[in-house]
Image (tube, grey):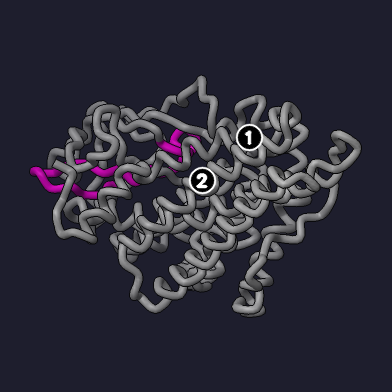
Amino acid sequence: MKKFKGVDYFKIEDLLTHEEKMVRDSVREFVEEEFLPVIEKHYQNATFPFEMVKKMGELGVFGLTLPPEYGCAGLNNVAYGLVMQELERGDSGLRSFASVQSGLVMYPIYTFGSEDQKMKWLPELASGEKIGCFGLTEPDYGSNPGGMVTKAEKVEGGFILNGAKMWITNGTIADVAVVWAKLDGVIKGFLVEKGFEGFSAPEMKGKHSLRASITSELIFQDVFVPDENLLPGSGGLKSPLMCLNQARYGIAWGVIGSAMACYDTAVNYSKSRIQFNRPIAGYQLTQQKLVYMLTEITKAQLLNYHMAKLKDDQKVKHTHISMAKRNNCEAALDIARTSREILGANGILDEYPVMRHAANLESVKTYEGTHEMHTLILGEDITGISAFE
């Protein structure tokens, strides 16, 4: 198999530090040598490759931007973005695992948790010894998380939790769930641990997308959560939305990995596929498609790089992240579909990654805020008028 060299038409490589390149290259090598040889089998069997978790922990990809005192790398957001890009070049399921572990579990514990909670959970989550999940979406409340019906009631020594969550990545295998529930009408975060009585996390089956990722329901039936498992700094809908911003940031970078994989496959295939006595790469219609794909990848890369610099400078707005997530997911899905067109019937075979990426991106475009929701977030920012109600 030809070694992946990257896609970098505008020489963004020249903007990266030595450390950022080292991090990217180490994850690229891991994906190339250890993940790509097994992903198609896992995708076909609808299983997640657990053996990758400890290896990713050893690489330091979990909570990469958090401080070293909690077992994390303390690197910048460019490095984190590049890691997400390389993981998703392997598969959206691999990047989703890392995104949830980092942005939706470690981030809220670090941001809203007590020092005891940070010391208990962050080092083991960073190493991959423990796995986490994030419970916000409910069966009847997806795009409107503020309508959640999961409730917590204060009792002596803790809280009683009742409700359900849905579409939860890693839920069935998680050691701890960051669960959002209303306490006296105010949204608060709780750490619900595996084994708590009344807590179950059945896996959701029958997916045509993200097949190499575990998706679960979370069910809470009179679950007692001790006082020390309340995230003390959490409060209101803003808290989980801050977490979603972290996840959306990783998605904006990740999907470019999928797009790069599809583009690279299409270029190589079109040069070797002979029809009417010449490579199909020599036909105008094919070249138009390749130019479109490369242009959209380049635009997304530049958007991501500047977004990362704004994030490192603490100048990024949630609307910036919405724009990147919205644009890049749509572009990546279009690129995957266009790549499939170039490969023709061969594009549906597991010999090539294209159809797998296309199916995954259908989900990625939807989760952590649908395309339409991010459109309305940006529309409100532009006009000052909310179109949500």
Give me the residue at 63% from left, 34% from top. Answer: 356
Residue 368 location, quadrant: top left
Along the viewing direction, whichever of 106 and 212 lies nearer the viewer: 212
As drawn, the label of residue 131 is: none
Based on the picture, tell me whether residue 296 belongs to the magenta stretch: no
- Quarter residue 279 falls in: top right
The percent coordinates of residue 171 (x first, y second) are 44, 36
| Residue 234 shows up from this direction | yes
Q: Residues within 10 Å of mark 2 (few under 14, many from 20)?
A: many
- Coordinates of residue 74 in the picture (x, y in percent): 50, 72
Q: Nearer the viewer, mark 2 or mark 1?
A: 1
Q: Would you name the residue on which mark 2 appears? A: 96
- As shown in the figure, which amino acid type bears the numbered disc 2? Ser
Which SS does the magenta portion mostly show? Answer: strand
Q: Secondary structure at mark 1?
A: helix
Residue at 17% in and 53% down: 236
Query: In the image, 9: left or right of 234?
Result: right
The quarter of the picture where the C terminus appears is top left
Q: Which residues are magenta?
A: 168-190
Relative image position of residue 145 (x, y in whole percent): 24, 41
Question: Which of 140/376 is in front?
Answer: 376
Q: Which residue is mark 1?
A: 356
Closer to the chain start, of discs 2 and 1, is 2
Looking at the image, which is closer to me, 123 or 381? 381
- Tell me, yes or no, whether the highlighted magenta stretch contains residue 173: yes
Residue sitting at x 53%, y 64%: 80
Q: Nearer the viewer, residue 151 or 283?
A: 283
Amino acid type at mark 1: Arg
Point out residue 381 in the picture as x, y percentages from the top left corner.
Answer: 23, 60
